[in-house]
Image (cartoon, helix red, strand yellow):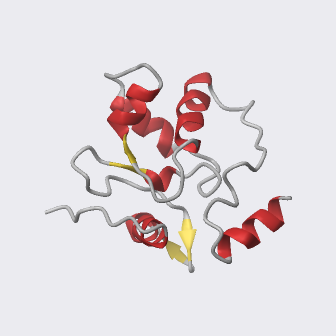
Amino acid sequence: AGRRALEAFVAGDLGALDDLPIDMDDRPGWDRLVLGAVRGIRPGATASYGEVARMIGRPGAARAVGAAVGRNPLGLVIPCHRVIAGDGSLGGYGGGWWGGRQAGLELKRELLAREGVHPRVSP
């Protein structure tokens, strides 16, 4: 199921990974809460770290949300690239390795553009 979902995603089905079953039992409770909310952000949509904090009932926890998002072990399945800064800019992104180099914000920008989202550029 996972391989087919990934192939469908690469072929252009942006929601192919959204319902893929995952096991987060080894993650701390806070991370499971935050990443569960992030998983609910659908293709073409974004939410700020503060908005995710409000989604989970912790409106003052934007930085803690950012820390949990930064520990995301399943970057495409749990779409942390859809979490942006409160000012509408990209914010941060670990992104792992892509094309033999550290990906970071370049990959985040590419993933969002693929979904039709174009966050503002930070000054």
> Does residue 89 appear left or right of residue 115 in this picture?
left
**Quarter that holds the C terminus:** bottom left
Rendered residue at 66%/74% (across/down): 10
Q: Nearer the viewer, residue 54 or 30?
A: 54
> Does residue 4 appear left or right of residue 63 in this picture?
right
Counting every numbered tag in the picture gives: 0
Q: Residue furthest right?
A: 1
- Which picture quadrant has residue 63? top left
Q: x, y percentage for residue 4? A: 82, 67
Q: x, y percentage for residue 72? A: 57, 45
Q: Nearer the viewer, residue 80 or 47?
A: 47
Q: x, y percentage for residue 83? A: 42, 48
Q: x, y percentage for residue 108? A: 44, 64
**Quarter that holds the N terminus:** bottom right
Q: Residue furthest left?
A: 123
- Which picture quadrant has residue 25? top right
Q: Nearer the viewer, residue 66 or 100?
A: 66
Rendered residue at 68%/78% (across/down): 11
> Does residue 94 appear left or right of residue 12 in this picture?
left
Q: Nearer the viewer, residue 32 or 21?
A: 21
Rendered residue at 66%/51% (across/down): 18
Rendered residue at 51%/46% (across/down): 41
114 vs 91: above or below: below
44 vs 84: above or below: below
